[in-house]
Image (tube, coloured by chain):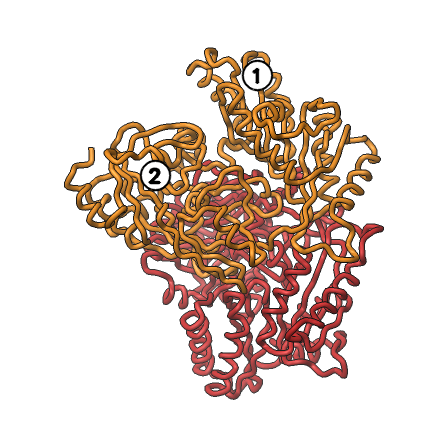
Chain colours: A orange, B red
Amino acid sequence: MVDRNSLRQLRDLLGPGGLLTPESGLAGYEVGARYDTGRAAFVARPASVAQVSRVLSFCCRNGIALLPQSGNTGLVAGSTPDMSGLQGILSLDRLREPFELDYDNRTLRVGAGVRLSEINARMRDAGLSLPIDLGADPCAGGMAATNTGGARFLRFGDIRRNTLGLTVVLANEQGTILELGGELRKDNTGPDWKQCFIGTSGAFGVIAECVFNLERLPVQTAAAYLVPRSDDHVMPLLHAMEERLGFHLSAFEGMSGAAIGHALAHVPSLRNPFPGAAIPDYVLFAEVSRSWPRRENEQPLEAFLEEVLAEIWERAGQPLADAFTGRPDEMWALRHALSEGVKSAGRLVAFDLAFRRGDVMRFRSHMRTELARQFPEVEICDFGHVGDGGVHFNLVVPRAAEATDELIDRLRETVITAAVEEFGGSFSAEHGLGRRNQPFYDRYEDPRLKRLAAAFKRATSPAPIGAVILG
Amino acid sequence: MVDRNSLRQLRDLLGPGGLLTPESGLAGYEVGARYDTGRAAFVARPASVAQVSRVLSFCCRNGIALLPQSGNTGLVAGSTPDMSGLQGILSLDRLREPFELDYDNRTLRVGAGVRLSEINARMRDAGLSLPIDLGADPCAGGMAATNTGGARFLRFGDIRRNTLGLTVVLANEQGTILELGGELRKDNTGPDWKQCFIGTSGAFGVIAECVFNLERLPVQTAAAYLVPRSDDHVMPLLHAMEERLGFHLSAFEGMSGAAIGHALAHVPSLRNPFPGAAIPDYVLFAEVSRSWPRRENEQPLEAFLEEVLAEIWERAGQPLADAFTGRPDEMWALRHALSEGVKSAGRLVAFDLAFRRGDVMRFRSHMRTELARQFPEVEICDFGHVGDGGVHFNLVVPRAAEATDELIDRLRETVITAAVEEFGGSFSAEHGLGRRNQPFYDRYEDPRLKRLAAAFKRATSPAPIGAVILG
């Protein structure tokens, strides 16, 4: 329990609206986007970096554990409190400033509490965007703390690649404020410490401000579904597309027929795009884009894509069973509905894995055999990012009664063990680190790197902060 | 002095050809590419990661300071020994394995001693390249240790962006070997520690192997010189090019007339490309490229570029005084001759600076006034990367007798002070950290970050290693 005296001091420190207590209801902060409901001792809502520093300093000196949270859209329990009721939430949702575009530099300095959708809405008139494409709508701070990736990683990379600077506040007695990097694109004047705060869920300090790279906004897009003749044809298709389309290729996704089926069933407004409504076992989704308006002498992008698909169609080995272009917005709508569709189909057991690109289909094939043998009651509803090796290996137990804790634990164990130990894959691709994947960090991280993390934590934020323990 | 007994033990440890001593001549390892000649106690040339570990362990236990070196092409004295004769050079030039292409994954695992030119020669048949474009030909390890950038940063980023994994050996009693990252493109399973070894010149450990991202090789290129009507027209020109050319734009360089003049005088095979041989005060050099062979329905790239230049020519504000396309290889030859040309013109005082893009021309204009007033004997021969804010602000003192140490010190002080304190720029953009910029690290790095570096060094490589002291 956090005592009344501490709460009063925090309230004084933060001013009106700055502190919420359980009496006033904290549900919006205590419930995660997919899993987990916890209990918070309070929610502190600093309105400036200086207030973040004062809260961290106060809590550090008074032994109060804090959990940073911005959009709370994460999927690994990195920003929802545990059930102890002892953690205070450090919400960054009032850090909505600065919002400073440097147009010449193509960079934006932004407070941790600004949503991705707002960034992109406000950058549209300048013809720029933060090129992260997600189903969710996180805030700047959370994106950096989880190093989020997304569906256009193939072309634009993750948040790490697009972050030039961070303002970080440490969980120490001083509440030290550090400026790490800034607006410069080339800068090697010392260790690039901001990298240690990206993707570490606040364990080393709280991200209060970010400087992001912006890219020219895509204004021409075209998209296609590709049905590979077999699993073995997926990589040749990716190569054929990369060879012919070059930097046009902005997404190359994979969708299982099972996931597509659930999305179509769950969202009635979606149209079944497949001939005769027959959903293939596996469908690739490719997007191409250009950031300039179509020029007079330029072939329309959809015609270009169709021509490339026709060439690939004729190719030796016939990698394609079917292919057709369509309206990119409709096609993305189906892609982005997969997650909710799968969730509606029963008890979801989700994995955010990554592999070498060549292993994506091999892992899938291996797990189909393995799960059919060990877990016949489970349906594989995977989808993901073939172009970067990311796989949302989502499993569904259709009949809720069968989804016992014991079954789910065994499933997790089987999938993670195969992914990491047999395929050299990652158990945490792009959703970040949270309580959900702490056991796998504990198991797989090199003990020497855990000791390094412990030393780094002592040197930055010795106080308890964040949902994961690195070290 | 390193005693004979230690040398004998090192020789035993490394086998034939593994240890060079001053008697056998070490000149190739002791002389830097631009500055600095030092004296080494020995050169250890391990032929495997295990041998790197044994050398580091041995030297650490026997108090022998080591300086890692791979291609020794750096410009900041990061890999040449000092004059003490007490440092041993840890040359990585025999680490020419592995050389493992994962074609499906578009990644290459490569030993620290493999040259950039060899990587790209051997990747050509696969249609791939490590997209770093430099005048020099460094090795993999040195590129990672300096976080090198180059002329195509605008499109492909620096080595940091293109590094997925590192094998690092620590300078501690165990010679600990760490695998940091690997072939995965998405991986957030813990802190991304490899980032701390990129760009820190070996101070925290020796980079022995790298896993690099590869990109499709450009096969269509076109290039143009653009003469801006004034300094104020440079940024509008960059915007106009980015808007119309999008991801085609692979370089946007700036070259001073003075630097061009010296290059043309120094390299007789270069043709003066300017009408009437009249060299403008400042010239922009833009390259566009595509990674696929020209398609039937596709406008030739040079025609596309010419059309865009014609549009910009007509633009309100008339940003262009002149513009013309040419053969990209000839144009790059001039661009890459600038460095040697400037060096031949007198005593060179070089700076590797970076700014927000909008400040590149402002800084130039400021320094022209400032240097004319304070240093009339000095000629400004700058060039660099307007598209990413990088500036090789090279100064020449034409009459060697005037280039006193005192003058050069005052010059350095004036330029760095203005760059960092007045313009918020970087004193080390892309050449890395070496003895040359140690004083500026010491002066400008936040003391709290120095303490963090000291703690990180204690936790990684407590023994003396490398040319810089971070902390």
C-alpha distance separating marks 1 and 2: 34 Å
Name the residue located 74 percent from the left edge and 44 percent from the top edge. Answer: A302
Is residue A362 shown left or right of residue A213?
right
Quarter of the C terminus of chain B within the rendering: bottom left
Is residue B60 shown left or right of residue A252?
left
Q: Amino acid at mark 1?
A: Leu
Viewer-side residue, A93 vs B92: A93
Instruction: Provide the secondary structure element on which disc 2 rests.
Output: loop
Query: Residue A336 placed where, x, y %?
Result: 57, 34
Query: Residue B194 placed where, x, y %?
Result: 48, 46
Q: Is residue B59 above or below residue A411?
A: below
- Residue B200 marker: none
Viewer-side residue, B170 vs A135: A135
Instruction: Provide the secondary structure element on which disc 1 rests.
Output: helix
Query: Residue B139 placed where, x, y %?
Result: 60, 54
- Residue B79 in view: no
Q: Is residue A154 above or below residue A435?
A: below
- Residue A227 in view: yes
Name the residue located 32 percent from the left edge and 53 percent from the top edge. Answer: A48
Read off the residue under disc 1.
A371
Q: Amino acid at mark 2?
A: Gly
